[in-house]
Amino acid sequence: IYIFIIMKVLAIESSCDDTSIAIVDNFKKIKYIQTINHQKFHKDFGGVVPEIAARQHLDIMDMVLKNLPLKQLKSVDYIAATYGPGLIGGLIVGSSVAKGLAIAFNKPLLPINHLQAHLLSPRLVANVSFPYLCLLVSGGNTAIVLIESAKRFKILGSTIDDSAGECFDKVAKVMGLGYPGGPALEKKAIGGDPHSFKLPSPLTKTKNCNFSFSGLKTAAIRIIQTHNKEKNFEKNFASSFQESISSILKIKIKNALSVLKEKNIIIKDFSICGGVAANKKINYDLKKYINSQNINFSQVPLSLCTDNAAMIGWNALELSKTIKFKKNNYNIRPTPNILINE
């Protein structure tokens, strides 16, 4: 006789400019989720203003929690929250609210690494088994990671300067497309010629898995400044820039698969996560390549690519299988600069 016990987690995400609260169970069901983005408060500044973000988290968190039925709050087994990395103001708000709820309802408190949550999110929406390879591409991070378990993350390569998301945003800003730049640049690229401008591909001649996007960013800005009055410039350049990013990512993934082959590590699954994972061009190109290698490509839904509490809750459930959490785990402090494997 098998007895299936339903475990539920109330999770909070507040690391940057998304306030999100979710209830997730161990059967991969998102019982409740509400995510509110602050972009309208930051767009006039061309990026996220930490103080504004912290105040918005405080206001929105209070509103969302008031809308969540008390019965649902009491029914959860754990309280989880992002403790890093991220902006310290937002992390303090989210972790403090989580701590208060854990004390009020006498529930174990689970601190979650935001980057690890991104990397484990494919398992929430698909049948992805350990070990698997994941490309993390967000506003602050670009890395290829081998996920060996819910607690073991091996970084095969990461950016040595700018992230892919940061490169998207800065180039879009110079083009006058506003913030956030990634979605605006992707929209502008529709109908453009991806081969109209030749852009550099830093570090692609080397066989390692590290990334560099600062040189590409600098070259892109120079082209914008010298060609911006040409007919159809914006859509052709946006298309070429997007093509360059996609090509770099593909080359580095190819290198990562070679590394795994040399070490006799067999994977069946690959996924892409983080905000840039919402880019359709990048998804299409990587899926085509990964499938040609007889590896399953798992796409995280667009709603879960950006920061959200569902992935925080799922990370907590993954950890709850292997770690016993104390109910009085209230002395943990937010860590803004925590790394993937910490």
Image: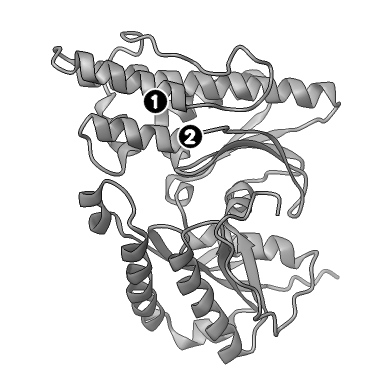
Residue 217 numbered tag? 1
The amino acid pointed to by label 1 is Lys
Question: Where residue 126 sits: x, y (%)?
Answer: 61, 46
Q: Is residue 70 above or below residue 339?
A: below
Q: Is residue 83 above or below residue 114?
A: below
Split into 4 quadrants, where in the image is the C terminus? bottom right
Q: Secondary structure at mark 2?
A: loop
> In the image, is 39 to the left or to the right of 27?
left
Q: Which scheme is used to colour this image of the protein?
A: one colour
Q: Residue at x 43, y 45 (%)?
A: 302
Residue labelled with disc 2: 162
Question: Where residue 214 sits: x, y (%)?
Answer: 45, 27
Residue 325, quarter of the rendered image: bottom right
The crowd level at tag 2 (other Cα within 10 Å; few <14, some 14-19, many 20+) is some
Are discs 1 and 2 less than 8 Å apart at CB?
A: yes
Give the mark, 1 or 2, whose residue is nearer the N terminus: 2
Q: Residue at x 50, y 57 (%)?
A: 86
* Closer to the camera in the image, 24 or 192: 192
Split into 4 quadrants, where in the image is the N terminus? bottom right
Q: Is residue 211 above or below residue 227?
A: below
Question: Where residue 340 sits: x, y (%)?
Answer: 65, 49
Q: Residue at x 55, y 59 (%)?
A: 336
Residue 128, quarter of the rendered image: top right
The crowd level at tag 1 (other Cα within 10 Å; few <14, some 14-19, many 20+) is many
